[in-house]
């Protein structure tokens, strides 16, 4: 084998002259264990918590803690939590993500866009690399990477992009790539959140206090330049405006703290306890940073948060579901996708078909000459 043939690139489909450009949207979520068992949860947590974007402490120290303590103790406890929210179809996060992708594909097709829509998970099964491999094998030449995270954070969005870049580093003939960084203040997404809450209140009445709970990250990420904290607050402010809430009618909190370091405050569970002790009778909690219901919403908020509030003296607790397959949300997601597809020939019109055929013919003629 010659020196020049010893490349790092993986084997890929041969280049075809005259190939008609094809476009895909890859909707990317965090991921989930395959089953609610300690073994599968351990594998999932090992990959998730080994990501240097997620845990930014000295590598050797963290790996000793992770493999010496956390992965010995936490999987069994987390598996029991997953089991409490598991559905006959599987993990709620996977179920909702699959439905969102099918609906997005249908909505785009109705508007004349000939694109392939798939989903991928940053951790666990249906990996980003496997989905990109599959799309490339199908002849896709343009890919829009669309995160399921409205607010940008290095711990989520940038990590997702890392996985795309890692795949790209091993590919010889790369597709065109576009990335959606954030949509925390997108008018359509805010409108979808507002209407979802208003619809819930119409059926169940209004609370004394609305708590908007976002996933937490270490406070140091804010000081290091991560915009996540600011984007969460902007989402909350815009949502409050949409709902017509005054500042004393809602609170912004952060959940899912891990370890002893200081995370973004105020924390969700202590806030719920304080509200219960203060005599607030009814609290509703919504999670505007999650587009699909999952462990953090259904178990951590819907079960643990409920128990904390009621045990502190609260009388009525409501968890307002994520957007999931809400038609207003899917419409907003479709419009957001169309904005980021701008300039790529995805519309199935007679002119677009003729142009594609003309380009293909010209390329084929050039290849023969």
Image (tube, grey):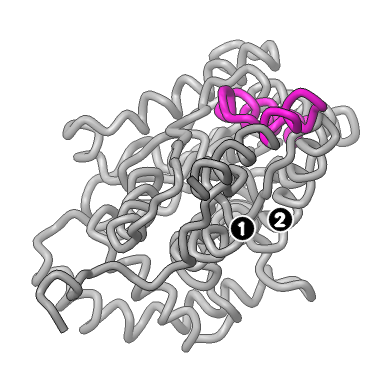
Taking the view exactly as shown, the residue that stands out farthest to the front is: 369
Location of residue 77 with respect to 344 vertically, above or below: below
State the image coordinates of residue 124 (x, y, percent, origin top left).
48, 71
The residue mark sitting in front, 2 or 1, is: 2
Label 2 – label 1 distance at C-alpha: 9 Å
Q: Residues within 10 Å of mark 2 (few under 14, many from 20)?
A: some
State the image coordinates of residue 43 (x, y, percent, origin top left).
41, 80
State the image coordinates of residue 142 (x, y, percent, origin top left).
52, 43
Image quarter where the N terminus lies is bottom left
Taking the view exactly as shown, the residue that stands out farthest to the right is: 203
Tell me which numbered mark, 2 or 1, is placed earlier along the sequence.
Answer: 2
Q: Which residue is mark 2?
A: 96
The quarter holding residue 12 reads bottom left
Location of residue 117 with respect to 278 vertically, above or below: below
User: What residue is at 32 percent from the left and 29 percent from the top?
Assistant: 227
At mark 2, the secondary structure is helix
The residue closer to the viewer here, 183 or 341, is 341
User: What residue is at 65 percent from the left and 14 percent from the top?
Assistant: 245
Q: Which residue is mark 1?
A: 294
Say if residue 318 shows up in the picture. no
Tell me how many marks there are. Answer: 2
The residue closer to the viewer here, 321 or 326, is 326
User: What residue is at 36 percent from the left and 39 percent from the top?
Assistant: 153
First to last magenta residue range: 328-356
Magenta-drawn stretch contains 350: yes
Say if residue 83 shows up in the picture. yes
Q: Main secondary structure of the magenta part?
A: helix
């Amino acid at each position: 084998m010659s020196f020049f043939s010893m490349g790092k690139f993986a084997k890929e489909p041969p280049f075809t002259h005259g190939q008609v450009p094809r476009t895909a949207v890859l909707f990317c979520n965090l991921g989930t264990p395959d089953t609610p068992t300690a073994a599968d949860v351990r594998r999932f947590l090992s990959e998730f918590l080994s990501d240097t974007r997620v845990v930014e402490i000295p590598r050797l120290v963290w790996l000793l803690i992770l493999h010496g303590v956390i992965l010995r103790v936490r999987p069994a406890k987390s598996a029991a939590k997953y089991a409490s929210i598991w559905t006959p179809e599987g993990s709620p996060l996977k179920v909702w993500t699959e439905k969102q992708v099918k609906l997005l594909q249908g909505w785009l097709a109705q508007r004349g866009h000939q694109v392939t829509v798939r989903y991928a998970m940053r951790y666990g099964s249906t990996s980003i690399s496997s989905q990109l491999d599959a799309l490339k094998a199908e002849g896709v030449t343009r890919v829009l990477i669309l995160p399921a995270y409205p607010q940008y954070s290095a711990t989520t969005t940038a990590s997702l992009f890392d996985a795309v870049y890692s795949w790209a580093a091993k590919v010889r003939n790369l597709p065109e790539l576009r990335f959606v960084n954030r949509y925390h203040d997108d008018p359509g997404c805010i409108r979808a959140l507002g209407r979802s809450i208003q619809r819930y209140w119409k059926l169940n009445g209004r609370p004394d206090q609305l708590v908007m709970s976002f996933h937490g990250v270490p406070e140091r990420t804010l000081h290091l330049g991560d915009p996540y904290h600011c984007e969460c607050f902007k989402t909350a402010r815009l949502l409050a405006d949409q709902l017509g809430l005054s500042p004393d009618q809602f609170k912004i909190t952060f959940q899912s703290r891990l370890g002893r370091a200081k995370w973004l405050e105020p924390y969700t569970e202590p806030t719920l306890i304080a509200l219960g002790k203060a005599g607030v009778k009814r609290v509703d909690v919504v999670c505007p940073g999650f587009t699909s219901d999952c462990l953090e919403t259904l178990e951590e908020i819907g079960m643990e948060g409920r128990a904390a509030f009621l045990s502190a003296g609260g009388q009525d607790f409501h968890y307002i579901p994520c957007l999931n397959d809400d038609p207003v949300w899917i419409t907003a997601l479709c419009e957001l996708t169309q904005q980021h597809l701008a300039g790529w020939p995805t519309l199935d019109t007679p002119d677009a078909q003729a142009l594609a055929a003309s380009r293909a013919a010209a390329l084929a003629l050039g290849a023969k000459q």
